[in-house]
Amino acid sequence: MIETINNLKNNRVKTGLVASSILSEHVVRMKKTLGSLNARNSKVGEPLRIGLRDIREADKRGKWWLIGASYHEPTENIESKAKVTQLHDLSSQKPEDADSMQDIAGDMLQMAREQRMTTDVRRTIFVAIMSATDYSDAFQRLMKLRLKKSQELEIPKVLVHCAGAEEAYNPYYTLLSRRLCTDRKLKMAFQFCLWTFFKRFGEDDDVGEDETAHEEEKPEMRAIVNLAKMYGTLIAEGGLTLNALKVLNFAYSQPPSRIFVEVLMITVILQSQKATDKSRDEEKLVGIFAQAGSNAALSKGLLYFLKMTVSKTDIADSKVDLEKIKWGCRVARDVLRPMTLHEHAN
């Protein structure tokens, strides 16, 4: 390309059929390259925010900008995670004047950067979620952003990140996610986020499709529990189905994955019984586990996990919940067992 430009500058353009075809090929290639720079789906992100302090303290904090490099989280970032809940509470308060509103917006943008919201789209989504008064307000704010279809897929990623960063499980994110799951594309995006989460646990490379899965550290126990409760509630309320777990090999899954699925299954059983006046709503629980019937491998894996792990759990909050969990495991096994027997018969 540079040689062609210099030749044009010095009036050294070659003549002839061959030279003309080569020049035409170069022009077409240049047009394609320049046209791709303004493509909507361009994967070119923002430049990394590497400062002089990061380079000087690379031996202490790690070279976090390299994929696969270790990273020692500084104190200010740990404190920023604790501020997520405080910031959400602050946003629900009515500001007294325009200056306080600007201060809150500035705090949220700073928080978005501390939470590694690396693009303008993610930062905008983050501010819309954290500045809302409730999940309905958050949904309306997200709709008013008028994001492109490719940009809308960033919403579940930001939601999952925020839910995992909370000090304790916050149903606000679950309620908003349930509302968003009415859209099929966003529903699939939440499923892909879950698969990426499994990949961060060390599951097989064919789990999930997110290219950034290995760029982050393994999740903390807090994030595991928060997201397990969130996805468990989504499954219990019909936002997602148990088919979201089809990528797991339950018999050989990693310890963090087993903890995640255990909490998720307990949440599914308990949440499925909360919306009923009866002491036990067997029909609803049967309907949830019957959705796995089209996947024999998933049914077999769930049957194994319920028998070996969930029915023997010791993390129930009370004896009443423990009895309900054991009852739910029996109901679920009764639903799944005929499905696995049908596979053997075939």
Image: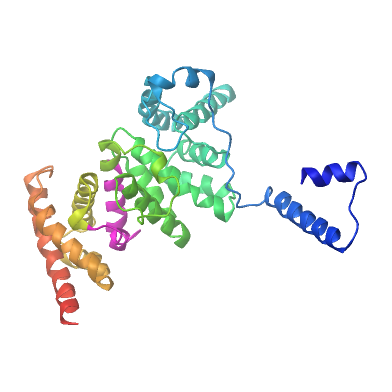
The answer to whether 100 appears left or right of 276 in the picture is right
Q: Does residue 239 show up magenta in the picture?
A: yes
Q: Can residue 343 be seen at all in this image of the molecule?
A: yes
Q: What stretch is highlighted in magenta?
A: 226-249
Q: Where is residue 46 in the image (x, y as percent from the top left)?
A: 58, 37
The residue at the far bottom in this view is 346
Nearer to the camera, 137 or 261: 261
Q: Where is residue 211 in the image (x, y as percent from the top left)?
A: 45, 48
The answer to whether 44 appears left or right of 325 in the picture is right
Q: Does residue 4 show up magenta in the picture?
A: no
The residue at the far right in this view is 11
Q: Where is residue 70 in the image (x, y as percent from the top left)?
A: 37, 31
Quadrant housing the C terminus: bottom left
> Chief secondary structure of the magenta span?
helix
Nearer to the camera, 75 or 42: 42
Identity of the residue drawn at 22% across and 51% down: 267
The answer to whether 127 appears left or right of 345 in the picture is right
Nearer to the camera, 174 or 277: 174
Q: Position of residue 285 (x, y in %)?
A: 20, 63
Give above or below for 134 relative to 104. Answer: below
Q: Can residue 273 be seen at all in this image of the molecule?
A: no
